[in-house]
């Protein structure tokens, strides 16, 4: 369906199709239930390692969450206005392992030409 767009990660039929966007902090997903999702997120263990930078200081859970949310805010602020203006809805998800911002929009999977155009548009927004 969208195989002419290079860079898709391998996935199972029940998983979203996932593509890296030109801004390295972002991914684009097409879910089996018909959503186009631009997502940016951080693994909490990776962030903890990066923020401690080899020091003996260990960040508590609340402080780590606050710092990661700050980084996520910086990452999403460049694109939020454009995504919202184009009809994407924003949600934030945080688990014990990661925190991520999802910008989602319903798409019609039976119209591959329209979906392909939306993907190309998203790719153009995220060029540095």
Image (tube, grey):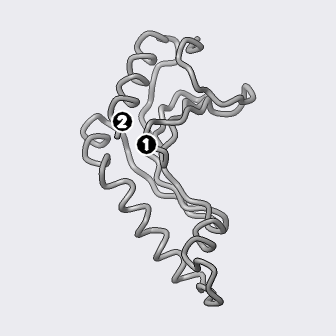
In the depicted view, which residue is nearer to us: 56 or 116?
A: 56
* Residue beneath the point at 54% across and 75% down: 51
Q: Position of residue 11 (x, y in %)?
A: 72, 30
Query: Which image quadrant is residue 16 in?
Result: top right
- Looking at marks 1 and 2 on the same chain, the residue that comes earlier in the sequence is marked by 1
Asked which secondary structure carries label 2, the reply is: loop
* Residue beneath the point at 44% across and 30% down: 106
Query: Which image quadrant is residue 70 in?
Result: bottom left
- 107 w.r.t. 38: above or below: above
Q: Which mark is residue 69?
A: none
Give the distance between the C-alpha atoms of the residues marked 1 and 2, in whole angstroms.
Answer: 6 Å
Asked which secondary structure carries label 1, the reply is: loop
* Residue beneath the point at 37% across and 38% down: 126
Q: Position of residue 20 (x, y in %)?
A: 53, 36
Q: Are marks 1 and 2 in contact (CB under 8 Å)?
A: yes
* Quarter in which the C terminus is drawn: top left
Rate crowding at label 1 as few (under 14), some (14 to 19) or many (20 or more) other CA atoms within 10 Å: some
* Residue for badge 2: 127
- 66 w.r.t. 115: above or below: below
* Residue beneath the point at 61% across and 67% down: 44
Question: Is residue 31 left or right of 25 when viewed as pictured?
Answer: right
Q: Position of residue 100 (x, y in %)?
A: 52, 56
Q: Residue furthest bottom?
A: 57
Q: Which mark is residue 23?
A: 1
């Amino acid at each position: 369906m969208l195989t002419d767009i290079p860079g898709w990660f391998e996935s199972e039929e029940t998983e979203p199709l996932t593509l890296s966007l030109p801004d390295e902090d972002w991914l684009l997903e097409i879910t089996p239930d018909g959503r186009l999702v631009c997502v940016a997120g951080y693994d909490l263990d990776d962030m903890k390692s990066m923020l401690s930078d080899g020091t003996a200081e260990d960040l508590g859970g609340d402080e780590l969450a606050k710092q990661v949310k700050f980084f996520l805010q910086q990452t999403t602020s460049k694109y939020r206005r454009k995504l919202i203006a184009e009809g994407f809805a924003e949600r934030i998800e945080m688990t014990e392992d990661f925190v991520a911002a999802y910008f989602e929009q319903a798409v019609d999977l039976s119209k591959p030409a329209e979906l392909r155009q939306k993907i190309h548009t998203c790719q153009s927004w995220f060029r540095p």
